[in-house]
Image (cartoon, rainbow, N blue to C red):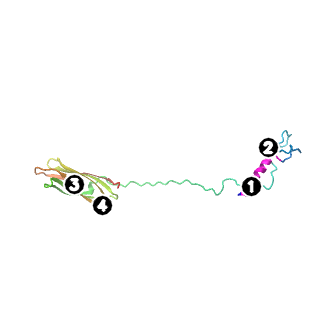
Amino acid sequence: MQRRSMRICAVALVGLIALTGCGKKKGGSHDGGLGGFVSGGSGGNDNPASGPTDLPSGMPTDLPSGVPSDVPSYDAPTPSYTYSAPATYNSDGTSDISASGCDYDESTRSFQYTLNLRNPETQSMHYSITIEWEDQNGGSLLGSDYKSVTVASGGSQTLSATSYRTLTQQTSFTCKVTSALKYPSST
């Protein structure tokens, strides 16, 4: 590397000498040995911009030019996007519930209903369930309960719905799940 830089300096020095005319005699006169351009010359090639024509021989030929071959090239990465559609599920969970034991317990003065919940989805689901007891004769609401539960994928769970109320007379009633909303669980 040191030899190459010395060659480059030598070439630069020779080029500078050639451009300034230092050491070159013009018309038999040398301006006191100071070098430089001869002013007031008569004809010939006095234009310094035309460049030197008598360059010294033996100049190095291995000077670098262009872009070095060892510079790494950079290719911008092509972004790849993968879209995966969200899992589909039925948000109405009433078909996931089977119920039994619609009853009234006189000792505890409560309506009771047993819910068997089974999650058929491929992910854990959260269920929000509303249960109501209605008077079969007049359709009035006798009681209600609300259950919130998370069931693992393919799992099942049994819930007991209860609503407290004192009945003073013989009453026919029905038990029903009025809504069961389900959505993917975040846990």
**Residue 62 seen in the figure:** no
Q: Main secondary structure of the magenta part?
A: helix
Amino acid tagged 2? Pro
**Mark found first going from the N terminus, 1 or 4:** 1
Amino acid tagged 3? Ala
Q: CA distance from mark 2 to mark 3?
A: 107 Å
Q: CA distance from mark 1 to mark 3?
A: 96 Å
Amino acid tagged 1? Met
Q: CA distance from mark 1 to mark 2?
A: 26 Å
Which residue is identified by label 4? 155
Number of residues whose C-alpha sits closer than 10 Å to that of mark 2, classed few (under 14), some (14–19) or many (20 or more): few
**Mark found first going from the N terminus, 3 or 4:** 4
Q: Position of residue 119 (x, y in %)?
A: 30, 58
Which residue is identified by label 3? 161
Q: CA distance from mark 3 to mark 4?
A: 19 Å
Q: CA distance from mark 1 to mark 4?
A: 83 Å
**Mark found first going from the N terminus, 4 or 2:** 2
Which element type, helix, strand or loop, lies under badge 4? loop
x 21%, y 50%: residue: 144
Which residue is identified by label 1? 6
Q: Say which of 147 and 133 sits in front.
A: 147
x 77%, y 50%: residue: 13
Q: CA distance from mark 4 to mark 2?
A: 95 Å
